[in-house]
């Protein structure tokens, strides 16, 4: 299946240094706007596999071990925003390529 960029929301829907949740193809995705990072916009699955809840969009964004991460609001594990990998456990969440273009947020989706 071919991948294509899909418009998800406007940049103005995002909050700098924080996350918001969006429904994308029937799944909750956590979108993060980090203007001081190289990529600026990140997208990972919103489901915390350890806390068993859709809460990652509510976590705290930080720069840890030279990586942009979000700390789960439940048990505080850190998930990399570029890969979805958990730093403390051997679990990960889905991650999506994201970009900001003309004040629109896009995800690369099938």
Image (cartoon, rainbow, N blue to C red):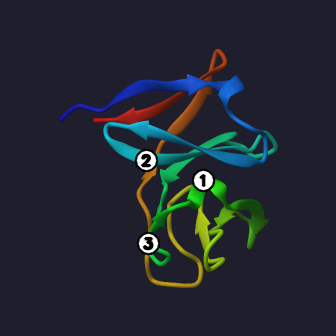
- In this rendering, position of residue 46 left or right of residue 108: right
Query: How many numbered markers are drawn?
Result: 3
C-beta proximity under 8 Å, tags 2 and 1: yes
Residue in the image at 50% along x and 75% along y: 51
* Residue 52 circle label: 3
- In this rendering, position of residue 70 left or right of residue 51: right
C-beta proximity under 8 Å, tags 2 and 3: no
Image coords of residue 29 (percent x, y): 47, 47
- C-alpha gap between disc 2 and disc 3: 13 Å
Residue in the image at 55% along x and 60% along y: 55
- Circle 2 Cα neighbour tier, 10 Å, few/some/many (<14 / 14–19 / ≥20): some
Residue in the image at 82% along x and 44% along y: 36
Residue lying at the far right of the rendered structure = 36
* Element at label 3: loop
- In this rendering, position of residue 23 left or right of residue 20: left
* Residue 57 circle label: 1
Residue in the image at 32% along x and 41% along y: 26
Q: Quadrant of the N terminus?
A: top left
Image coords of residue 85 (percent x, y): 50, 69
> Hey, which quadrant is residue 93 in on the image?
bottom left
- Circle 3 Cα neighbour tier, 10 Å, few/some/many (<14 / 14–19 / ≥20): few
- In this rendering, position of residue 66 left or right of residue 72: right
User: Front-most of 5 and 46?
Assistant: 46
Q: Does 96 appear above or below 109?
A: below
Which comes before the other along the chain, label 2 or label 3?
2
* Residue 28 circle label: 2
* Element at label 1: helix
Which comes before the other along the chain, label 1 or label 3?
3
């Amino acid at each position: 299946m071919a991948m294509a960029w899909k418009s998800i929301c406007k940049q103005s829907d995002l909050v700098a240094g924080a996350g918001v949740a969006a429904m994308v193809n029937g799944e909750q995705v956590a979108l993060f706007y980090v203007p001081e990072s190289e990529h600026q916009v990140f997208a990972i699955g919103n489901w915390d596999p350890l806390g068993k809840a859709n809460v990652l969009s509510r976590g705290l964004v930080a720069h840890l071990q030279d990586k942009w991460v979000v700390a789960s609001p439940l048990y505080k594990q850190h998930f990399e925003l570029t890969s979805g990998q958990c730093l403390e456990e051997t679990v990960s969440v889905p991650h999506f390529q994201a970009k900001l273009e003309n004040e629109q947020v896009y995800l690369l989706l099938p």
